[in-house]
Image (cartoon, grey):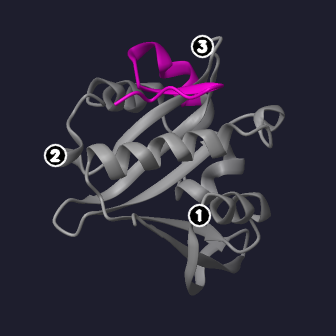
Amino acid sequence: MNLKGENIYLRALEPLDLEFLYELENNPEIWEISGTVTPYSKQVLRKYLENAHRDIYDVKQLRLCICDNSTKKLGLIDLFDFDPKNQRAGLGIVVLQNEDRNKGVGSEAISLLCRYAFETLALRQLFANVTEDNVASLHLFKKMGFVEVGLKKDWIFSQGDYKNEILFQKINS
């Protein structure tokens, strides 16, 4: 399966991605979407990278680096809660820098990963969780054919208040 699009490609994480992963995982602006509450040390992230080669059937997750055609690292895209019995997984995406957002990176990355999930992993459905105030992600997932199927009230506690989270699904037809 080719994970290369017109403007970006998805690749496995490499040991050389330590600094990028350190910057991304320790960015408080994305902690809300990643569920992070404390910073990660380089030692912890190095161990994570050492195990990043493990099979999705074993660890129930696949994390890929989103790169542009000049090999610049733009973000990460994940399949998580991989459930081969029920043929589903969650999908999460983050593009690190504001200047790389709203340029089609997310759309292309989601398109590539959906094709991989449906064709290679034989999944029936993907789901995504988006806080109701994340306008850009709500627009992105709707644009990519995900359908709003539920509302999780007061699901995320952030900055002293609760936020609702919207559940999206994309079923392979």
Question: Hey, what amino acid is under mark 1?
Answer: Gly
Taking the magenta stretch, the answer to whether it contains residue 82 is no
Q: What is the distance, in whole Å, between disc 1 and disc 2 at their CAs?
A: 29 Å
Q: Position of residue 35 (x, y in %)?
A: 52, 59
Which sits earlier in the primary sequence, circle 3 or circle 1?
3
Q: Is residue 107 left or right of residue 103?
A: left
Of marks 3 and 1, the one in the foreground: 1
Residue stretch rendered in magenta on the structure = 1-22
Residue 65 seen in the figure: yes
Name the residue beneath numbered marker 2: 58
At x 20%, y 37%, the residue is: 55
Check contact, mark 2 vs mark 3: CB within 8 A: no
Distance from Cα at disc 2 to Cα at disc 3: 29 Å
Q: Amino acid at mark 2?
A: Asp
Task: Identify the residue at horizontal 61%, vertical 35% (top origin).
Answer: 24
Seen in the picture, residue 118 relative to 109 is either above or below; the reply is below
Circle on res. 71: 3
Quadrant in the picture for the C terminus: bottom left
